[in-house]
C-alpha cells in the first residue's frame, strides 16, 4: 500500500475511495499490467503476415525481457501466478484465465500456420503452444533468479530453431 501511495501521491483514503479492498487493488493492478502486455504483443503480431513471422515477433518481444521489461515489475502473469498460487484464489483465477488466453492465442497462430500449409500438419498446435509459453515464462524466471539474462535469450533462440523445423519443405 505504501508503494501505491508513493507512486500516486494519493492519501490512503483517496485510494480506498476508488477501491473497496487491497484485493480489488491487486486485481486492478494485474488486469492493467496484463492488458498492457497483451496490447504490446498484439501490436507486434499484427505487423506480421505469416504465422512464423508472428511467432518470431513474440520471441523478439521477450528478448532481454529480464533486463529491459516492457512493463515495470516484469511479467505480470508470471509474478501473479507465483504470488497468488494457493494463497489468493480470486487472483489465481485471473492468472489462470490469462494463461489460457496466452496459450490459446499461440495455438491459434500455430494452427493457422498448419492450415495455410506453412507448418507441417504433424505438429500439435496446443502442445507446441503450451511448450512455447512454458519455455518463455520459465526462461524469464531462470534469468531473473540467476541474474543471467542470456538464459532467456538462449531459450528464445532454441524456440526459434524449433519453429524453423515446423516449416514445410
Image (spheres, rainbow, N blue to C red):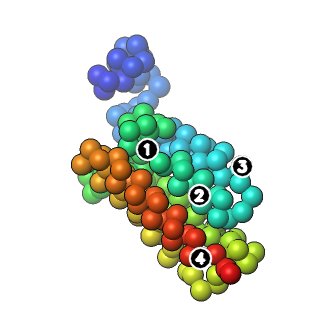
User: Would you call the spot at circle 3 few (<14 residues within 10 Å), some (14-19), or many (20 or more)?
Assistant: few
Q: What residue do we see at 29% from left, 54% from top? A: 142
| Residue lying at the far bottom of the rendered structure | 122
32 or 131, nearer to the observer: 131
- Which badge, 2 or 1, comes first in the chain's sequence? 2
Q: Which residue is mark 2?
A: 56
- Which badge, 4 or 1, comes first in the chain's sequence? 1
Residue 158, horizontal then vertical, whole percent: 45, 65
Report, in whole angstroms, how far the alpha carbon at label 2 lies from the one at label 1. 15 Å
Report, in whole angstroms, how far the alpha carbon at label 3 lies from the one at label 2. 11 Å
- Which badge, 3 or 2, comes first in the chain's sequence? 3
Q: Which residue is mark 4?
A: 166
Q: Secondary structure at mark 3?
A: loop
The answer to whether residue 137 is visible is no
- Res 104 quadrant in image: bottom right
Q: Secondary structure at mark 4?
A: helix
Q: Which mark is residue 139?
A: none
Q: Which residue is mark 3?
A: 47
Q: Secondary structure at mark 1?
A: loop
Q: Which mark is residue 65?
A: 1
User: Would you call the spot at circle 4 few (<14 residues within 10 Å), some (14-19), or many (20 or more)?
Assistant: some
Report, in whole angstroms, how far the alpha carbon at label 4 lies from the one at label 2. 13 Å
Residue 169, horizontal then vertical, whole percent: 68, 81
Residue 153, horizontal then vertical, whole percent: 42, 53
15 or 101, nearer to the observer: 101
Q: What residue do we see at 59% from left, 58% from top? A: 56
Q: Is label 3 in contact with label 4 (beta carbons under 8 Å)?
A: no
Amino acid at each position: 500500500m505504501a508503494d501505491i501511495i508513493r507512486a500516486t501521491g494519493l492519501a490512503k483514503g483517496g485510494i480506498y475511495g476508488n477501491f473497496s479492498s487491497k484485493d480489488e487493488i491487486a486485481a486492478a493492478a494485474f488486469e492493467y499490467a496484463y492488458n498492457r502486455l497483451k496490447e504490446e504483443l498484439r501490436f507486434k503480431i499484427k505487423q506480421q503476415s505469416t504465422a512464423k513471422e508472428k511467432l518470431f515477433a513474440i520471441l523478439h518481444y521477450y528478448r532481454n525481457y529480464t533486463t529491459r521489461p516492457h512493463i515495470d515489475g516484469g511479467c505480470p502473469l508470471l509474478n501473479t501466478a507465483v504470488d497468488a498460487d494457493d494463497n489468493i484464489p480470486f487472483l489465481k483465477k485471473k492468472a489462470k484465465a490469462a494463461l489460457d488466453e496466452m496459450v490459446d492465442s499461440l495455438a491459434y497462430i500455430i494452427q493457422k500456420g498448419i492450415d495455410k500449409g506453412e507448418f507441417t500438419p504433424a505438429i500439435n498446435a496446443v502442445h507446441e503452444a503450451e511448450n512455447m509459453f512454458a519455455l518463455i515464462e520459465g526462461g524469464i524466471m531462470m534469468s531473473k533468479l540467476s541474474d543471467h539474462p542470456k538464459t532467456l535469450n538462449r531459450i528464445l533462440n532454441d524456440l526459434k530453431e524449433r519453429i524453423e523445423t515446423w516449416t514445410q519443405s
